[in-house]
Image (cartoon, rainbow, N blue to C red):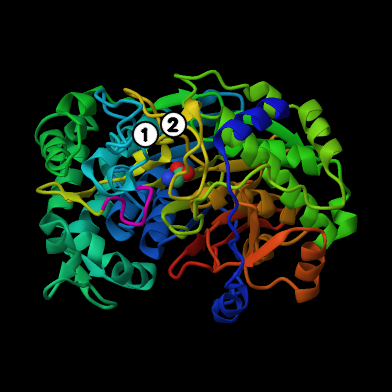
Amino acid sequence: MRRIISLTLALFLSGTLAFAQSTPQLASTLPTIPQARGIGGHFGMVVAQERLAAQIGVGILDRGGNAVDAAVAVGFALAVTYPRAGNLGGGGFMVIHLAKGARGNEARDIAIDYRETAPEAATPTMFLDAAGNPDPAKSRDSGLSVGVPGTVAGLALAHDKYGSGRLSLAELIAPAIRLAEQGFRVQDDLADSLPAAAKKLARFPSTAGILLKNGGKPLQSGDRLIQFDLADTLQAIAARGPRAFYEGTTAKLIADAVQQAGGIMTEQDLANYRAIERPVVRGTYRGRTIVSMPPPSSGGVHLIEMLNILEGYDLRHLGRGDEALHYFIEAMKRAYADRAVFMGDPDAVKIPQAGLISKKYADSLRAEITDKATPSADIHPGKPGEHEGQNTTHHSIIDRDGNAVSNTYTLNFSYGLGLIADGTGVLLNNELDDFTAKAGASNAYGLVGFAANLPGPGKRPLSSMTPTIVLQDGKPLLITGSPGGSRIITAVLQVVTNVIDFQMPVADAVSAPRIHQQWQPEETVVEPGFAPEVLAALTARGHMIVPTRPGTSANSIEVTADGYVGAADPRTRGALAAGY
Ligand code: GLY
């Protein structure tokens, strides 16, 4: 496998870039990571990136809903209260663990793929300019970047097949409708994120009229955000089900808005959209079972690939010092190299998934690792980190019966394309930038891709979202996941290993500074909080260490002997663990 990658790379990549030049100045200005607090509960726990939505989830559990019901209610609520990533106009993935007895079944694990799809008119060259080069203005900033939204179909499917049956879809949507209609005070991450997005949002009067005010100034902390059109769209879904979104007036308004912004999505594309149930990807790590999202996410496969490599080292004994971190970096580099070449939409390309997650393959990769950094074969001239941050959102939920949900969904960039389809209140994604515009090119996260991830009709762009449930003796031990673009998979890896190897309580596991390496470029980014001597030792091994601001937000739950412990990631203001 590795030989194929090297050959492919030699063909496509050239040149070197150094990213570490401004390191000292950057390091001194980076914010530190606050410590998360573990919140206890015995009957249920919801950890989400926005507090109103988290409280709605707990309310649903308290009314007898199961974890899936709560996740669906939180998903709809975040579309109102957390517009930078919560959505109806984007897509995502839900991993579910149904406990024994739920719906009369043996325990089982389910993955729901509600990733956006490319319109039928999509072509492999749709994101190239006249000279045949990738054109980010097309894949990130125009209507061409909008994928057919999957969220409404995905949440409805989850409720229909795996909800408790005690609460209707309308009952789960009702709190979101109330918040949209009556409004709520702008606070926390919404207030923090709007100023940076204001210029993008101002391009579209339909968006500016809702999220900006006073001549283009963003809503501020304490202002009331009311979204009547969004309330109407939610009301229609509550009354008539998901088809009210994918057909009729709402679908027409969305298709019109996308086309006016230069896109090719049609009403028929919306009518054709289907969420898909897929077998989860499953691995083992030190006696636990890892249950995660299969392709079109790369998350689960590469999480398991990295864990398999790391399983060969005595991490607990090593502690989180430079030797252990060196192995993490080397594992990350190899997994992301595989990601670039092999991964795409499983309905369109053949992915060697079984090979990638096999212990034997991990053994062969581990055998390549020495005590010095292995240089990446070549450097792609992208700039990862440019758009990193809370561009996606993750919630983890468990109910009193041990049913668990790990859900990550997204608009891709913060506030997606920035376009609210006029008359719907629905903010649209720019997810199609996650395709590879041209073999060897990188997306906004600096992730290099090849033929497997080129755009095509109805295809789903490759994702990094990694909603994950770790089982011990068949029952949930840890529920985790994260936003953060390319940094998602490595964030989840570190939460899992912090709990299992380094024996941290979940609040510490989530707060601990993280590293990230994605094979291209050569740099390993490190959050504030690592000891300078550890970083110096990594540099001495040959790693290019680059400080970065805290990113990702791994809202997680651990099941302990004393009950559920929820940890809201302290990197995002307003994230909340709510238990009872
Ligand atoms: N748009 C980020 C991801 O799906 O990985």
Q: Residues within 10 Å of mark 2 (few under 14, many from 20)?
A: many
- Point out the stretch of residues depicted in magenta: 411-417
Asked if the residue under mark 1 is in contact with the one under mark 2, i.e. CB atoms within 8 Å, the reply is yes
Left or right of 411 in this view: 25 = right
On the question of residue 364 being in view, the answer is yes
Q: Secondary structure at mark 1?
A: helix
Task: Give the amino acid at mark 1.
Answer: Gly
Asked if residue 202 is among those painted magenta in the image, a careful observer would answer: no
**Image check: 545 left or right of 69?**
right
Ligand 1: which quarter?
top left
Amino acid on which the number 2 mark rests in the picture:
Asp
Picture quadrant where residue 10 is located: top right
Q: Locate residue 470, reporting x and y percent.
A: 66, 42
Quarter location, residue 65: top left
| Mark 2 / mark 1, whichever is N-terminal | 2
Q: Is mark 1 within 8 Å of ligand 1?
A: no
Crowd class of label 1 (few under 14; some 14 to 19; many from 20; radius 10 Å): many
In the picture of the structure, the residue carrying the numbered disc 1 is: 154
Q: Give coordinates of residue 11: x percent, y percent.
A: 58, 31
Q: Main secondary structure of the magenta part?
A: loop
Say which residue label 2 marks. 113
**Which residue is at a point 68% across and 61% down the rendered structure image?**
509
**Which residue: 78% across, 39% down?**
309
Q: Is residue 79 above or below residue 364?
A: below
Query: What is the quadrant of the N terminus in the image?
Result: top right
